[in-house]
């Protein structure tokens, strides 16, 4: 699903009415977080910008100049939201390619779990579609579609990235939508003033009005658009520091910001390495390849699955191009001491992956005919294969080679990795243990190798509902020597309640917590890339539930 948010570019109508099928709605989401129904902060807040997806929603080309008041009919398209017998007409910010509408839910819309929305176009009205209306549910905008780098600027409105960092004590401005309703019309320039009582989490610090939260309300120019001015707390540092907002008692999507010590404009813990970060900072472009092998072993409770069983090995590769203006796309993991979650996405690598490296990559090693790593779409720079379904697994202390024959952007290459021995394991976590999502979780471990991952460990988790309509993955990085790490409750709250699955006589939870260490990366050279690394990680974990 291609999510196009064009708040500032809403342009002229070219179109005449044509005969077409009735509009059909497929989804309604907060325009910042895109949280799925059932996930935390998934409701549409009064006064917020929302995005509606579907088909036949309007003309193929809809260009109309933006102005105040924001119209409720654009290119012949209008919306109606009905909650508890009251109907409202949302102001429309744009209609895009007949499959997406961006609009503002009026602040006076009643709250309720059983609301409906319809689209009217060309004398036809869609079937009703459910919408949950809440007082507040904040979604932060991100340049990369609800994940990765958050849309945070400094006070001069320069975008925060790994080459334009914030520093402890600096003021940052987080942009999003969903703080709550305002008095008056949502179709005109909004009033200045705080809205609601949000808490901003920066790293592991809760920022409130008494500790650096300076303003949380509408932006000065655009209806529905919220800005949160906050002070970066002391002790925060890293290329990928989490930032999230709790509004109305729920936490929305978690993005990241880049924070460096005073006097430094770049951060230093990205897998890109300092040389390539410096090249970006100096105005150059950087093309980067990242290859990762993962082996995950989970403990089961069923007698026939006693001990541990392989839970699904995968191989990934991303080939990404960054410019100084798009450095926000260089999103790899999470900095040490912090956690992030991402709905349905593995937050270990959320880079843009747009460089074509060929029709497929081949992984060679002690496994049988794994098949090619196929791109996610033709010309994409994202390659993936699941190895566990047919008994093909990644083994420790074995050589592996990734072969690429080359594509439009990346030449032929051969990258090598000798996998590391998994040596760190969870302690004090039991199979089928219930993990409350409302309390901090202290994760403890034993073993490990201080020579791996710069003396860090990676903690991961996933949780899915039984019907897979809700799902999220979690990643944390922590110092190995500490022997334990606390995952904050506000992070766990963004995971969905874990469902159960059945395989033959085995019933097992669709949740897991694991720990591992990345192997020291092996660099490789490729025509078309400024650099590349190949690494691996062995996770050892336990199946459990997040309740």
Image (cartoon, rainbow, N blue to C red):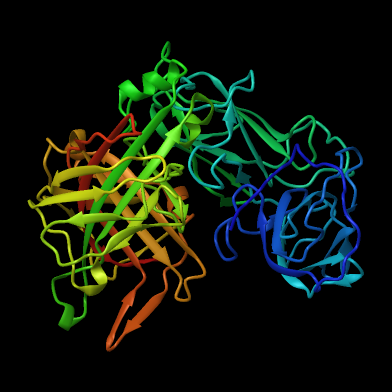
**Residue that lies at the very extreme toward the left in this rendered image:** 397
Q: Is residue 306 rendered to the left or right of residue 327? A: left
**Relative vertical location of residue 286 with respect to residue 410 in this rendering, above or below:** above
Q: Is residue 445 rendered to the left or right of residue 349? A: left
Image spot of residue 499 (x, y percent):
42, 73
**Quarter of the image where one finds residue 495:** bottom left
Image spot of residue 217 (x, y percent):
72, 35
Residue toward you, 289 or 356: 356
Q: Indicate the quadrant containing the C terminus: top left, top right, bottom left or bottom right.
A: bottom left
Q: How many marks?
A: 0
Q: Indicate the quadrant containing the N terminus: top left, top right, bottom left or bottom right.
A: bottom right
Which residue is located at x 44 percent, y 20 percent?
A: 284
Which residue is located at x 39 percent, y 33 percent?
A: 287
**Quarter of the image where one finds residue 519:** top left
Which residue is located at x 46 percent, y 19 percent?
A: 167
**Relative vertical location of residue 360 with respect to residue 410 in this rendering, above or below:** below
Image spot of residue 11 (x, y percent):
82, 41
Which residue is located at x 83 percent, y 46 percent?
A: 63
**Relative vertical location of residue 319 with respect to residue 261 in this rendering, above or below:** below
Residue toward you, 533 or 17: 17
Instruction: Say whether residue 70 is visible.
Output: yes
Q: Is residue 71 rendered to the left or right of residue 296? A: right
């Amino acid at each position: 699903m291609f999510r196009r948010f064009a708040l500032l570019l809403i342009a002229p109508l070219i179109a005449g009415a044509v005969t077409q099928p009735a509009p059909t709605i497929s989804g309604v989401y907060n325009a910042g977080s895109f949280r799925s129904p059932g996930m935390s902060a998934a409701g549409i807040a009064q006064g917020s910008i929302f995005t509606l997806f579907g088909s036949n929603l309007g003309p193929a080309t809809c260009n109309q100049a933006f102005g105040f008041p924001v119209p409720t009919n654009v290119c012949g398209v209008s919306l109606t939201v009905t909650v508890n017998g009251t109907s409202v007409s949302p102001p429309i910010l744009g209609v895009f390619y007949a499959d997406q509408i961006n609009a503002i839910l009026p602040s006076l819309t009643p709250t309720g779990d059983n609301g409906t929305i319809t689209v009217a176009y060309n004398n036809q009205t869609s079937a009703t579609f459910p919408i949950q209306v809440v007082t507040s549910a904040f979604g932060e905008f991100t340049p990369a579609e609800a994940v990765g780098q958050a849309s945070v600027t400094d006070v001069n409105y320069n975008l925060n990235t790994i080459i334009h960092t914030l520093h402890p004590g600096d003021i940052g401005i987080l942009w999003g939508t969903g703080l709550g309703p305002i008095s008056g019309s949502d179709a005109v320039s909004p009033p200045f003033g705080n809205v609601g009582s949000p808490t901003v989490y920066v790293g592991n610090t809760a920022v409130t009005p008494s500790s650096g939260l300076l303003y949380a309300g509408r932006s000065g120019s655009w209806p529905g658009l919220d800005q949160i001015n906050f002070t970066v707390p002391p002790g925060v540092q890293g290329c990928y520091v989490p930032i999230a907002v709790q509004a109305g008692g729920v936490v929305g999507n978690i993005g990241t910001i880049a924070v460096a010590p005073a006097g430094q404009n770049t951060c230093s813990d990205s897998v890109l390495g300092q040389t390539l970060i410096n090249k970006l900072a100096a105005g150059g472009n950087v093309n980067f390849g990242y290859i990762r092998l993962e082996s995950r072993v989970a403990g089961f409770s069923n007698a026939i699955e006693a001990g541990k069983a392989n839970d699904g090995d995968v191989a990934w590769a991303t080939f990404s191009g960054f410019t100084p203006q798009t450095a926000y796309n260089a999103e790899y993991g999470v900095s040490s001491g912090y956690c992030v979650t991402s709905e349905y996405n593995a937050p270990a690598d959320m880079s843009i992956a747009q460089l074509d490296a060929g029709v497929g990559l081949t992984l060679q090693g002690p496994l049988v005919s794994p098949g090619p790593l196929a791109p996610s779409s033709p010309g994409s720079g994202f390659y993936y294969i699941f190895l566990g379904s047919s008994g093909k697994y990644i083994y420790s202390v074995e050589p592996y080679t990734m072969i690429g024959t080359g594509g439009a952007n990346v030449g032929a290459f051969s990258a090598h990795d000798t996998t590391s021995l998994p040596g760190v394991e969870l302690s004090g976590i039991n199979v089928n243990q219930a993990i409350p999502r409302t309390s901090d979780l202290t994760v403890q471990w034993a073993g490990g190798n201080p020579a791996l991952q710069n003396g860090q460990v990676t903690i991961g988790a996933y949780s899915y509902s039984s019907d897979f309509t809700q799902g999220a993955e979690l990643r944390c990085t922590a110092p190995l020597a500490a022997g334990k790490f606390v995952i904050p409750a506000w992070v766990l709250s963004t995971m969905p309640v874990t469902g159960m699955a059945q395989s033959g006589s085995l019933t097992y939870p669709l949740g897991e917590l694991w720990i591992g260490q990345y192997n020291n990366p092996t660099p490789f050279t490729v025509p078309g890339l400024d650099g590349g690394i190949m690494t691996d990680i062995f996770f050892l974990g336990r199946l459990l539930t997040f309740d």
